Image (tube, helix red, strand yellow):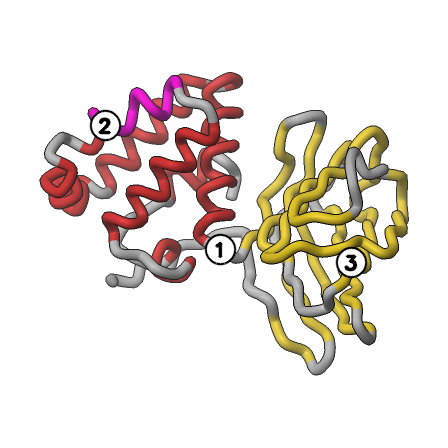
Amino acid sequence: MRKRGLVWGMTGLLLLGLCVAGSAAGVQVALYAAGDATVGLVTNTTGQAVTGLHIEFDQAVTIVNKVEIGGALPFTGATSGTSFDLAGGSLVADGTVELDWTPAAAKPVLIQWLSGAAPVGAPYFTTIQALGEVLAKGIVAARQAEPEKLQAAFQQFFADNADYFAQVSQALGTPLKDALMPIIMTAPAEGIENFFGTLVGLLGATSLDDVMNGDVNFTALFSLFGL
């Protein structure tokens, strides 16, 4: 696929000896091997206090330790599974949550700070599925808060990709805009995420890099969400 050099707030995991580190505008992550566990340090770089943290893993984990520096964010549910939410407290700007988990091989695929139920800052993500979730939740939030800006962003998105989307529309048997916009403006996040998965399949993307640096220019949408 053609490279576009898009800028996004996610970095992949960077190997540094036994330490793995990554960062994003909003989320800064450092992962350290510690025997049969991994120590994860998640720092709030949004520039503001947050009231929650959402984190998902690539496999089931058990959180064996949690320490906050700069506040308190209790778990809202169980400490074993693939997805966790911490809420009911607050964490200052530049505060850090340490989470230790087993098995050590498990890696986070999505991390997002929250203010109430709304995402804050750019997320950290490492998979196509996590990108779809991020976009879907961002679209629903924008639809509720600033629908005019959402419409304008998608107008630009379609203009930026007019030639390529003509090919996708032929494969769909209907103009992509006609198929997509009713979903964007009415569907719940899960429906938008499912459509994104279908679109990715039509694009032939099999990796996150294929999506981020491929034929589709997502700049207009990423700019809307501050990513």
* Count of marks overlaid on the render: 3
In this rendering, would 162 be left or right of 40? left
Q: Amino acid at mark 1?
A: Thr
The residue identified by callout 1 is 127
In this rendering, would 142 be left or right of 81? left
Marks 2 and 3 close (CB-CB < 8 Å): no
Task: Report if residue 95 lies within the magenta region.
Answer: no
Q: Is residue 116 above or below residue 44?
A: above
Element type at mark 2:
helix
Task: Give the percent coordinates (x, y) of residue 181.
Answer: 29, 24
The residue identified by callout 3 is 41
- Is 149 in front, or is 198? 198
Labelled disc at residue 179: 2
Task: Give the percent coordinates (x, y) of residue 77.
Answer: 78, 36
Residue extent of the magenta highlight: 177-186
Task: Give the percent coordinates (x, y) of residue 33.
Answer: 76, 73
Q: Residues within 10 Å of mark 1 (few under 14, many from 20)?
A: some
Q: CA distance from mark 1 to mark 2?
A: 25 Å
Q: Residue at x 13, y 42 (%)?
A: 171
In this rendering, would 173 be left or right of 206? left
In this rendering, would 63 be left or right of 215? right
Label 2 vs 3, first from the N-terminus:
3
Q: Residues within 10 Å of mark 3 (few under 14, many from 20)?
A: many
Which circle, 3 or 1, is nearer the viewer? 1
Label 3 vs 1, first from the N-terminus:
3
Task: Report if residue 180 lies within the magenta region.
Answer: yes
Q: Amino acid at mark 2?
A: Ala
Q: Is residue 49 visible?
A: no
Q: Is residue 51 visible?
A: yes
